[in-house]
Image: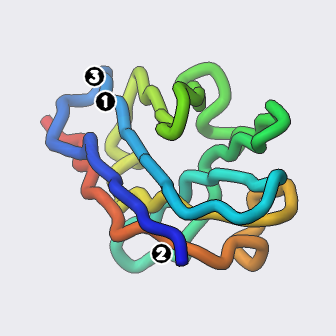
Amino acid sequence: QLQFVESGGGLVQPGGSLRLSCSVSGFTSDYYVIGWFRQATGKEREGVSCLSSTGGILYEDSAKGRFTISRDKGTVYLQMNSLQPDDTAVYYCAVARRFGLSEALYDYWGQGTQVTVSS
């Protein structure tokens, strides 16, 4: 099974920045996709961004121009700039074997990290 180490959440003011980190070990397939999802209180979980092992990237519309997903060795990062209160959520790292931001594609999930944007 896969092991996740997820971190980087916290409390920031509107307009601030955070960088989330997700280190995943235990891959048995050459092709995989790492995704970032978020779930705000009372709302459905939604895809934010994903990056495949071959370099493909997707962003949810509200993240375009503000968030950047990247990879350095075994760690995937989500750099979040210009954060707004609507970005407040628990952010989850997850693994899929097909490319996309549909939650149904993702079989393995990290523990989540809280991001709170408030003045």
Q: CA distance from mark 1 to mark 2?
A: 22 Å
Quadrant of the drawing holding the C terminus: top left
Judging depth in this view, the residue of 107 and 10 nearest the camera is 107
Q: On screen, 110 above or below 48?
A: below
Sequence-first tag of 3 and 2: 3
Residue for badge 2: 43
* In-image side of 21 versus 30 (left or right): left
Neighbor class of circle 3 (other Cα within 10 Å; few <14, some 14-19, many 20+) is some
Q: On screen, 23 above or below 57?
A: below
Q: CA distance from mark 3 to mark 1?
A: 7 Å
Task: Determine which of the numbered discs, if any, sits on residue 18 in the image.
Answer: 1
Residue at the image position 63 percent from the left and 20 percent from the top: 65
**Kind of residue sitting beneath label 1:** Leu
Q: Given contact means CB atoms under 8 Å apart, are the residues at marks 3 and 1 in contact?
A: yes
Judging depth in this view, the residue of 40 and 113 nearest the camera is 113
Judging depth in this view, the residue of 20 and 13 nearest the camera is 20
Report which quarter residue 97 is drawn in.
Answer: bottom right
Of badges 3 and 1, the one in the foreground is 1
Report which quarter residue 59 is drawn in.
Answer: top right
Residue at the image position 75 percent from the left and 78 percent from the top: 104
Whether residue 109 appears in this view of the structure is: yes
Where disc 2 sits, the SS reads loop
x, y percent for residue 60:
69, 45
x, y percent for residue 98:
86, 62
Of badges 1 and 2, the one in the foreground is 1
Where disc 1 sits, the SS reads strand
* In-image side of 14 versus 104 (left or right): left
x, y percent for residue 75:
48, 38
**Kind of residue sitting beneath label 3:** Gly
Residue for badge 3: 16
Where disc 3 sits, the SS reads loop
